[in-house]
Amino acid sequence: KNEVEQSPQNLTAQEGEFITINCSYSVGISALHWLQQHPGGGIVSLFMLSSGKKKHGRLIATINIQEKHSSLHITASHPRDSAVYICAVLTGANSKLTFGKGITLSVRP
Amino acid sequence: NAGVMQNPRHLVRRRGQEARLRCSPMKGHSHVYWYRQLPEEGLKFMVYLQKENIIDESGMPKERFSAEFPKEGPSILRIQQVVRGDSAAYFCASSPEADTQYFGPGTRLTVL
C-alpha cells in the first residue's frame, strides 16, 4: 500500500464544474503539498498546509490531520486547469517529500 | 528573485556516457532536494543536500549516482555509465529552511 493515495486516478470535467481531488496518507506528516504539473512541464507548488484550509483564487485546499486526509477543490473549472495534480507529504526530520501518483484532470470546454 | 534554475532542460546521452544535471537554488536557499520522475510513475525522492553536505541520500541508487552541493556554484547530480532505465525527468527543489519547497523546471534525460 502506498503511503500517499490519491483519488480518483483520472478525472474529466466540463468547464464550469466544481472539482474535488482527494488525498489520503498513512504516515505522520509535518505538512502536505499540493502540486500542479502540466504535460511535459515543470512542477508548481499550489499550497503547503499543515492544518485547516487555504484559498488562492479558484483553488481551495483543506486538510484533516486526524483523518489523514486532504482535498483540493477547484471552483468554476476552466480548460487551462487541465493538468496533473499531485499530493505530497513532508515526513521526517529532513522534510523529504513522499508523493502520490497524481491525478490527471481534463476540463472540457 | 529568479526561481530555481535547472540545466540543461533536455539531455540526450548514449548508454555508458555520463550525465551531469545542474540545479541552482533560489537566492538565499541552502537546502536542495533532487527527485526523479520515471515515465508513467510518480515522483521519488533521491537526495537532500545542504551546502557541502549530503544530509539524506536514502533514495539514491547505490551505484553510478552521486550528488554534491559545493560551497560555490550549483548542485550537481551525476549519473555515470547511464543505462536506458535512467531515462526520466529529474527535478530539483530548494527551500530556505526544511519546509516549503520550490521546484525547478526539470531536466529530461533520454538515454539512447
Image (spheres, helix red, strand yellow):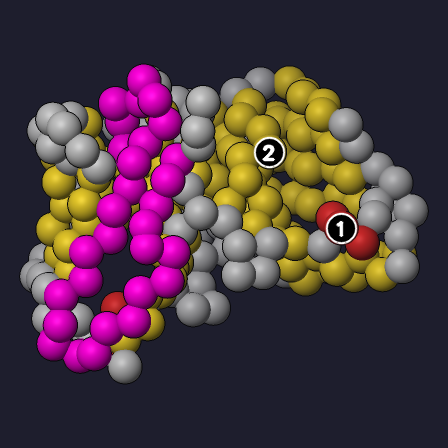
A52 or B55, nearer to the observer: B55
The structure residue drawn at horizontal position 84% and vertical position 45%, both measured from the top left corner, is A77
Q: Position of residue A97 (x, y in %)?
A: 38, 38
B15 or A92, nearer to the observer: B15
Residue contact at pointers 1 and 2, CB within 8 angstroms:
no
Of callouts 1 and 2, the N-terminal one: 2
The structure residue drawn at horizontal position 79% and vertical position 32%, both measured from the top left corner, is A58
Residue A98 lies, with reference to residue B53, above or below; the image says below
Chain of residue at mark 1? A
Circle 1 SS class = helix
How would you rate the neighbour count of disc 1 (Cα within 10 Å): few for under 14, some for 14-19, many for 20 or more? Answer: few
Chain of residue at mark 2? A
The structure residue drawn at horizontal position 17% and vertical position 71%, both measured from the top left corner, is B82
Q: Position of residue A65 (x, y in %)?
A: 55, 24
Residue B98 lies, with reference to residue B16, above or below; the image says above
Q: Amino acid at mark 2?
A: Leu
Say left or right for A76 vs B78: right
On whether residue B27 falls in the magenta region, the answer is yes
Say left or right for A58 vs B87: right
Q: Amino acid at mark 1?
A: Arg
Which residue is labeled 2 in the image?
A46
Which residue is labeled 1 in the image?
A80
| Image disc number at residue B12 | none
On whether residue A108 falls in the magenta region, the answer is no
A3 or B106, nearer to the observer: B106
Q: Position of residue A68 (x, y in %)?
A: 54, 33
| Magenta segment | B4-32
